[in-house]
Image (spheres, grey):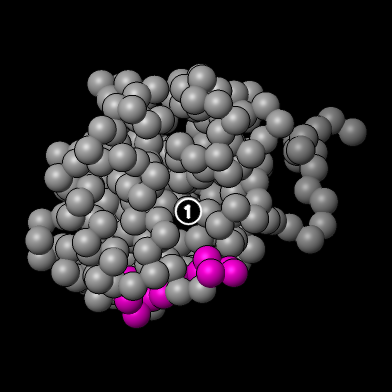
Amino acid sequence: MKDTFKIGKREFTSRLMVGTGKYPTPEVMKEALKESGAQIVTVAVRRVNLKRPEESFLGHIDTSLFTILPNTAGCYTADDAVRTARLAREAFSTDLIKLEVIGDEKTLFPDNEALLSSAKILVKEGFCVMPYTNDDPIMARKLEDAGCAAVMPLAAPIGSGLGIRNPYNIRIILETVKVPVIVDAGVGTASDAAVAMELGCDGVLMNTGIAGAKDPVRMARAMKLAVEAGRLAYLAGRIPRKLYAAASSPIDGMIG
């Protein structure tokens, strides 16, 4: 059976979402996006010349193959994030927005109070809001209640590559909300992506883990396979953990 998931009214088959920053060249970015198999590509609105977007890195992205997910990276207030989202809607003709409101310049952790207030405004204005938040089940529930189409808890600080620091909080979030849960930030290598999917997350969004690798194109391929493998493992159902050994070959009924 085809394994798909929905963001608002849109349906996707790839559960890997990728960013467009930090690549050594536009050509490497283009090849990495292809190898990732991603269908959703996120772009920072502040990095794009909105009057001539085709003259920026967007000129290297085939918009017939990818759904563009604008993001409000670099916004530190609710007003700034809302204004940036409105600009994105006009520039990209989309209601999709990855909502980021940063609360601290050093850690890049989100300002959840400002995040929630801006999410409420954008939902009322018809946006399909995908908020970047910390791994807080209470905030995830509040964002869902506000009408967000998904929640995107961090695995670790943005660009840190530390992997999932608190899988137990992610599991609680998965039990708390019904909207898609997409791990965002902190994924460093393929095993991190696989763990996120094995927990039951609906998807993974990453940028630095691919773009910052020594070979971004190979890493993009590795992340694609890791997300697919993790999803399959989750659907298959892992064996229970046991303290002691259990024979893989049963001895009952053997002739002595």
Note whether residue 8 is visible: no
Which residue shows up at 17% across the image and 47% down it? 89
Total residue callouts: 1
Magenta stretch, residue numbers: 105-115
Q: Point out residue 247 in the picture as x, y percentages from the top left corner.
A: 80, 43
Q: Point out residue 57 in the picture as x, y percentages from the top left corner.
A: 40, 30
* Drawn side of residue 183 relative to residue 186, left or right: left
Which residue shows up at 64% across the image and 55% down it? 160
Q: Quadrant of the C terminus?
A: top right
Which residue shows up at 41% across the image and 75% down it? 111
* Drawn side of residue 168 relative to residue 132, left or right: right
Note whether residue 7 is visible: yes
Q: Is residue 129 magenta?
A: no
Q: Point out residue 128 in the picture as x, y percentages from the top left corner.
A: 20, 53
Q: Quadrant of the N terminus?
A: top left
Which residue shows up at 58% across the image and 68% down it? 107
Looking at the image, which residue sits at the far right? 256
From the image, tell me which residue sits under label 1: 184
Q: Is residue 109 magenta?
A: yes
Kindly identify the amino acid type of the residue bearing the numbered disc 1: Asp
Q: Point out residue 66 in the picture as x, y percentages from the top left corner.
A: 32, 28
Q: Is residue 121 above or below residue 90?
A: below
* Drawn side of residue 10 relative to residue 150, left or right: left
Q: Is residue 40 above or below residue 240?
A: above
* Drawn side of residue 20 relative to residue 247, left or right: left
Residue closer to the observer: 28 or 238? 28
Q: Secondary structure at mark 1?
A: strand
Q: Is residue 127 above or below residue 213?
A: below
Q: Is residue 245 above or below residue 60?
A: below
